[in-house]
Amino acid sequence: MSQSVTPSRRPAAPKRPTSGASARASAPSSGPAALRSAATTAVGRAAGQVAAATTAAAAAAQDVVGGAAKALATPTGLVGAAVEAAWLTTHLALYPWGAFGRHGRDSHLEYRVEHLPPTQRGLVVSDVEAAGTPILLVHGMVDNRSIFTLLRHGLRRRGFGRVTSMNYSPFTADVRVAAVRLAEEVEALVAETGYERIHVVGHSMGGLIARYYVTRLGGDARVHTLVTLGTPHHGTYTAYGWHNQLTRQLRPGSGLLRELDQPVPECRTRFVVYWSDLDQMVFPQRNAALTHPDLSVRNIDLHGVGHMSLPIIGSVVHGISTTLAHLDAEGHTVTPGVTELPRRGA
């Protein structure tokens, strides 16, 4: 049997006056010690956030590098790395020659077919307009038209009669400025050929320049199809390797990329986007794919292809040729999508 015991209560002692020292001790602390404590807590909290962000960034970097390492460790990746090294050496030798010339000098405006192999004559014979639609090639940062030496030759061999390229200054410091320069080049090509719409192929930053022209400067009225090769559509962490206005624009989340992410209602240009898991210039590599709710985009992922090799790979040349031979919105049937403008004086 349990018993509950109620403790006896003693009379409460009379309250004593609180001294000044004890009053200050019982009052909320607001002196230097309290400030130091609050500052230490804030610093500790900020350090914890920085540590968490650093850990997340390190994990992301490890994932990106690990993905590239996996691609390189495959037979296809090893071959791709060897091709990249060989083409880079060749491209450096061709670079001085590519620094000169204008698009009008390397355009073939005739429609001869006797020089084409039988399997390549069909494009010109079946759709002269598709074969004659101008194709403008736009190089990347600190590069020139020589990067397209093999692509230009491959497109011509497949029957395209007007394959041209442009150079912009290697000291270009703003994608927007280069896009204005591209707009001028497109208008000159339209006036020269009589075609009101053309195709554009952009390598690396050249694709970003062309995208800005198409989506922000009204270039969709002139560009039927834009093909990008290894373009950092969502930025690249390699841009943190050096610091200037241009590289700041190429970083993920930059003001330029936020502008490109804005709505593009009723954009008429279709996009074909090539990206590779072995691209050593775009990190993470998947940032070279394009996602935008308002754009008609076909992303094509490649395995074991280096950044500089993207314009020379046979599958890329063939894919571009097949795509540009079809001028409808989806690329399934051969339907003329451009019309000849009346020439002056005609």
Image: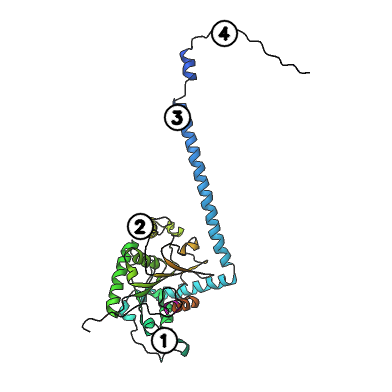
Q: Position of residue 249 (x, y in %)?
A: 38, 58
Q: Identify the residue under disc 1.
A: 126
Kindly report which numbered mark, 1 or 3, lies closer to the viewer in this rendering. Answer: 1
Magenta residues, dominant SS class: loop
Amino acid at dot 2: Gln
Kindly report which numbered mark, 1 or 4, lies closer to the viewer in this rendering. Answer: 1
Find the distance from the CA under tag 1 to the CA under tag 4. 111 Å
Find the distance from the CA under tag 2 to the CA under tag 3. 41 Å
Q: Point out the tag, 3 or 4, that comes first from the N-terminus.
A: 4
Amino acid at dot 3: Leu
Q: Identify the residue under disc 4.
A: 13
Q: Is residue 331 magenta?
A: yes
Q: Point out the tag, 2 or 4, that comes first from the N-terminus.
A: 4
Residue 245 — which label? 2
Amino acid at dot 1: Ser
Amino acid at dot 4: Ala
Q: Identify the residue under disc 3.
A: 35
Quarter of the image with the N terminus is top right
Q: Which residues are magenta?
A: 323-338
Q: Could you classify mark 3 by the number of other residues whose Cα lies within 10 Å: few (under 14), some (14-19), or many (20 or more)?
A: few
Q: Position of residue 276 (x, y in %)?
A: 50, 68
Q: Residue at x 43, y 66 (%)?
A: 231
Q: Point out the tag, 2 or 3, that comes first from the N-terminus.
A: 3
Kindly report which numbered mark, 3 or 4, lies closer to the viewer in this rendering. Answer: 4
